[in-house]
Amino acid sequence: MRTDDLIDLLARHEPARPPRRGVSALLLSLALAVPAATLLMAPLLGINPQLRAYLALPMFWVKAGFGLALAASAALLVLRLARPGVRAGAARYAPAVPVLGLWLLALAALVAAPAGRASELVFGSSWRSCPPSILALSLPVLAGALLALRRMAPTQLAAAGAAAGLLAGGLGAAIYALHCPELAAPFLATWYVVGALLPMALGAWLGPRVLRW
Amino acid sequence: MRDDRRSDDAAARADAQEAELHRLMVAAQGGDAAAYRELLRAVALRLRAFLRRRMTRLPDDVEDLVQETLLAMHNQRHTYDPSQPVTAWLHAIARYKLVDLLRRRARHEALNDPIDDVDAALLAVDAREGGVQRDLAALLGRLPERQRLPIVLMKLEGLSVIETAQRTGMSPSAVKVGVHRGLKALAAQLRADRADRES
């Protein structure tokens, strides 16, 4: 088939195709994946029995807010990287803001901590299970975000996959906060960040494999 | 001074081209088939020049990639937002398709063609259509009936949705879905076919 014939074929009887920014597809996939991940957690890890009391603690909201802020900044990045010719621009640095904020809090807590208690603040009682749990909870969200990206046209596949992974990691961290008993900022600044970076790395690896078009 | 004048001139031409392509793209997204055909013709001329200059060692593959890129553009045209320069959108897609091809080829032969951003405005045109290595009509024949028939009847023979629905016994919405999915499947087959020939 000649190129001119292909052009005639493509243009003939072609209905309107209004622009889509991918917002609704991404929100729909998150609306399905986030409840799925939460339902996954309840039987596997269990909701923190003291959750009701935790709701009154500022550090609980710092913890959940960190995950949500990370997810929101990554979602903006996903939407930019989903369209050809739109540069990531300054949005690429936005996810660093909640991380730096948490690190400042952790630094303040460590400076104020009595001598010899620093390692307790960093490791808490659950550092081993924290990052793998966040990764596991992020998987449904990562799958949903990648499916939404497949309906768009990312041209930087590893970057788009990494942004989807960070979005999943942020939401995974926020969901894990419903289980996690830890409240020390140095713990969160270390293990929550590691937990969110794992799905980001997975997304960067998956991007070139599943997002091609 | 002379260079300044030349670059001013190129910038003015780029602006005029952007305005024209933008007008056509917005009309095409709104369902104006004539504007869409004009847009695709203008884009094909520029794509061919863009790719031929960067594929000096793969001259036989230029026209195939022109067709693959046009089909990709068609399938993804909902990702163009009218607030964005249409040239940037086209350039990103052309670049993506070229890098995708070169990356696959690099596994078989060392290729050092630089993919620079010269001519990001896609000003050069090339009307010399080359031959193709693989025939889209043959790939079309491999699609399942519910996709192939709507494409053949509507897009090649020019029947309307209603006529196609009556001829095939499909519902009008199934006809539209068949065309849409069929063209996506065709794009996927093009990529798979390229991978086959290269391995």
Image (spheres, rainbow, N blue to C red):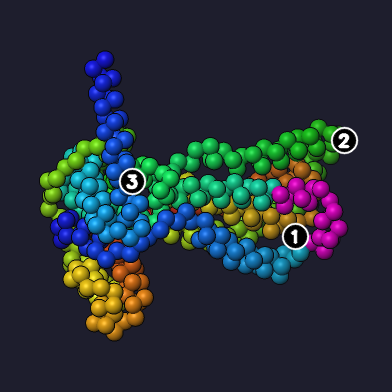
Image height check: is A179 above or below B13? below
Residue at the image position 56 percent from the left and 50 percent from the top: A75
Does residue A96 show up? yes
Residue at which label 3 appears: B22
Pinpoint the chain carrying mark 3. B
Image height check: is A156 above or below A17? above
Q: Amino acid at mark 3?
A: His
Q: Earlier in the sequence, mark 2 or mark 1?
A: 2
Front-lying residue, B129 or A119: B129
Which of the two discs, 2 and 3, sits closer to the camera?
Answer: 3
- Disc 1 residue crowd, few under 14, some 14–19, many 20+, Cα 10 Å: some
Quadrant position of the C terminus of chain A in the picture: bottom left
Pinpoint the chain carrying mark 1. A
The secondary structure that most of the magenta stretch takes on is: helix
Residue at the image position 27 percent from the left and 66 percent from the top: A13
Residue at the image position 26 percent from the left and 33 percent from the top: B13
Distance of label 1 from label 3 (alpha carbons): 51 Å
On the same chain, marks 1 and 3? The answer is no
A16 vs A55, left or right, is left
Residue A179 shows which numbered tag? 1
Residue at the image position 66 percent from the left and 42 percent from the top: A98
Q: Amino acid at mark 1?
A: His
Which residues are the magenta region?
A: A48-65
Residue A107 shows which numbered tag? none
